[in-house]
Amino acid sequence: MHILIIGAAGMVGRKLTDRLVASGLDGKAVEKLTLVDVVPPAAPTGFKGKAETLTADLSQPGASEKLVAGRPDVIFHLAAIVSGEAEADFDKGYRINLDGTRFLFEAIRQEGLRAAYKPRVVFTSSIAVFGAPFGDKIEDTFLSAPLTSYGTQKAIGELLLSDYSRKGFFDGIGIRLPTICIRPGKPNKAASGFFSNILREPLSGQEAVLPVAENVRHWHASPRAAVGFLLHAATLDLEKVGARRNLSLPGLSATVGEQIEALRRVAGEKAVKLIRREPDAVIQKIVAGWPSDFNPARAIALGFRAESSFDDIIRVHIEDELGGKIG
Amino acid sequence: MHILIIGAAGMVGRKLTDRLVASGLDGKAVEKLTLVDVVPPAAPTGFKGKAETLTADLSQPGASEKLVAGRPDVIFHLAAIVSGEAEADFDKGYRINLDGTRFLFEAIRQEGLRAAYKPRVVFTSSIAVFGAPFGDKIEDTFLSAPLTSYGTQKAIGELLLSDYSRKGFFDGIGIRLPTICIRPGKPNKAASGFFSNILREPLSGQEAVLPVAENVRHWHASPRAAVGFLLHAATLDLEKVGARRNLSLPGLSATVGEQIEALRRVAGEKAVKLIRREPDAVIQKIVAGWPSDFNPARAIALGFRAESSFDDIIRVHIEDELGGKIG
């Protein structure tokens, strides 16, 4: 099996690569891995098959054609510029997130017109396709009315994915990942960063800033769950999914206060004391427009699984990032 | 006021032109009308202002820039290739319905980057943005999950319109027209054609074919109502519409049997006898995937109005198309 990962240098792409190298896909060995990103992806370590690492920008004419010419069986399309950048640079957001995705889909179609070819395409969408006002929980039949250019571009990608799949050009599935928590690495300036920072930093003995109130509710899944979603999406029987190829995935709806209580249970009062309250009106306003809870009935029925407690989300981080130890 | 109508040669475009010439827009005279289509639009008759008729294909680079350079105050974007053609010719559908729309929106943005410019843009979307399964009535918060390329292209146009409006590049509003009934002219091969044919032809003493059962339910508004929707959309206070710029419009949900009963009331048994039952499995299957009823609460609250009985829809046709007389 030949697997192509576009956006392989990102956090999720790296974890997905590691998992495919360690465990294959659905019990089948991976013979070839093609890893692509705008910056050079690291070569997979310990991989017995053939690995290729490439830099490419999907928004450039011809870039997708080259990737697709290798006829990968599964294509993970994780590449995107993030919400903040897409909002600040309108042209770049549409070029990378919309044109890049459309060029990829079209390159697959053109490859299939030359000779039969119908790969599985797993597209990471986002809960940013939804914009307030919401009901209590976002149902599977709730409209996409994004309030950012990023969310708009992802929603358009979803529509294209469904139509190309319906026409039989590929077997596509779009998955709307919850906010990834605990995101490993250093604190970043993403408006959502604090959801991870307030857990990750104290777990390593560092101070973290909380810019919102404890009653702010949000929708989370661990990096390990995200990789599980991708693998499940790559192997799922799409007949069961039907025409609506884009799914809100399971996650854990929790308030910041509930996050902090879980931190207290897992790492003690000492860790909790490292969270410094520093209210930030700008971040509060952004976060108020975000989805906070879902009823992802379809994805659950299709076998997607996420954590069911924040204690578990914290433990995943301790196991996967901290070698099992709290710093 | 300068008004640009793109898609001016179509049935709705011609009726809109006539209405603007006769009554202006919201009590204000129209000083300039620019009428554009891929075929030459007819020059407006009896118009006191300046009229320009042009042929242009929005999907061609530079075409939109030329239209927008005239800085129209209101732009009606009615141009599209229809559902059947977009389904049969994938490339053409995306080129005209997606690229054409995106080029137009982008040309407006670029014009505004040169010097402040923020026209009203009225985009005709379609109930084809919805795909089965539906609930009893399609609510304003129901997802767009189209089952055709045409519906996909319209749904993408809606998303772009909302995002360009949110960013302040223009004042956009997208309106999902019900199926227009009674469509004037000759019977055509559109799968939806019979909804009009079974009324229009008998009203003129001609036979018509009914390919589906009488319990088939669908969503209708007259051509006169459609023009009313466009004029209202062009003048409505968009502050009241908020971020969700695309609206399902009011219409009349009726079964074919109810259509026929209305025909009987208005034109008698003689007209009804001209309907010949000729079941067509292909058309039955297509129609089964279409929306049949809506709860367009937002559009109604915003003042959009349609007919409330099929007798009225038939009377509108008799008045507007038959000079008040049944043939």
Image (cartoon, coloured by chain):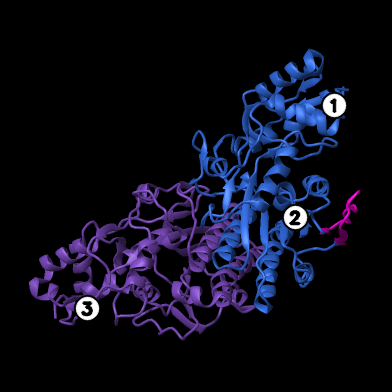
Chain colours: A purple, B blue
Q: Which residue is mark 2?
A: B79
Which percent across, then down, holds residue A33? Answer: 45, 75
Which quadrant holds residue B227? top right
Which percent across, then down, holds residue A190? Answer: 37, 75
Residues in magenta? Answer: B32-54
Element under label 2? Answer: loop
Query: Is residue A254 covered in magenta?
Result: no
Which quadrant holds residue A193? bottom left
Total labels: the figure holds 3
Name the image quarter holding the C terminus of chain A.
Answer: bottom left
Element under label 1? Answer: loop
Q: Amino acid at mark 1?
A: Gly
Q: Which residue is mark 3?
A: A208
Nearest the eye: A72 or B178: B178
Q: Residue at x 35, y 52 (%)?
A: A294
Q: Which residue is mark 1?
A: B324
Q: Amino acid at mark 2?
A: Ala
Q: Residue at x 70, y 48 (%)?
A: B231
Q: Residue at x 86, y 57 (%)?
A: B49
Element under label 3? Answer: strand
